[in-house]
Amino acid sequence: MYKHILLAFDHTKSSEKALEAAVGLLALEKEAELTITHVSTEKNSMNTNIYDRTRSAAPIMTPGLDKQNPPYMPPLPQEDKTVAHHLNDELDEALSSVKHNLDSRGIQANFYPLSGSPAEAICEYATGNNVDLVIVGRTEKNNFQKWFLGSVSEKIMQESPCNVLVVK
């Protein structure tokens, strides 16, 4: 049913539950590919090598409201490029622990960091990489924060080109 699953991970309890949902789906879909991403909103980046295979961060570059060009999705990085993405120490540790957790279960996953607006970056990656299911954790914001800041999971549900599973 699903061939390429994208999991948005931000080290919250809901994203950890989303990881378990992804693992459960992979048990049913033996041929499915799992990609785990985290979207950094930081403008500066630095090199990090927390993954077995180094990957380049893919910045999402949109033309702006006054331009009529479609958004640009950079091509998938080559494995020999240097990772150019800043993740804070806590997130580095979290993604490393996710990788270790999946490795211990014999589950292979790709790790692909993105930068920019989280909802936009996830949806544009899904569009450009034939993702057929996006899995996200439900927002952990209160009602005022959701009203004022918006909810990433809600924006992804509205904008995604494919099915979205929101895990509580």
Image (tube, rainbow, N blue to C red):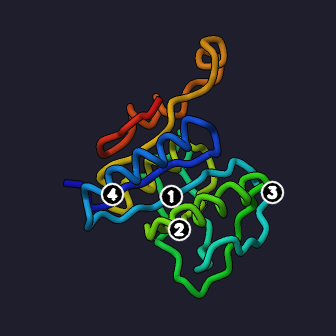
Mark 4 vs mark 3, CA separation in Å: 29 Å
Q: Residue at x 52, y 69 (%)?
A: 103
**Residue 123: horizontal and vertical position, in percent?**
43, 47
Mark 4 vs mark 2, CA separation in Å: 15 Å
Disc sitting over residue 36 in the figure: 1
Q: What residue would you read off at disc 3? A: 89
Q: Residue at x 45, y 56 (%)?
A: 125
Q: Amino acid at mark 3?
A: Asp
Q: Tag 1 or tag 4, which sits nearer the N-term?
A: 4
**Residue 37: horizontal and vertical position, in percent?**
54, 56
Q: What residue would you read off at disc 4? A: 26
Mark 3 vs mark 2, CA separation in Å: 22 Å
In this rendered view, identify the residue nearer to me: 39 or 121. 39
Q: Amino acid at mark 1?
A: Ile
Q: Tag 3 or tag 4, which sits nearer the N-term?
A: 4
Q: What residue would you read off at disc 2? A: 104
Mark 3 vs mark 1, CA separation in Å: 18 Å
Q: Please state which of the two labelled residues, at mark 3 or mark 2, is closer to the viewer.
A: 2
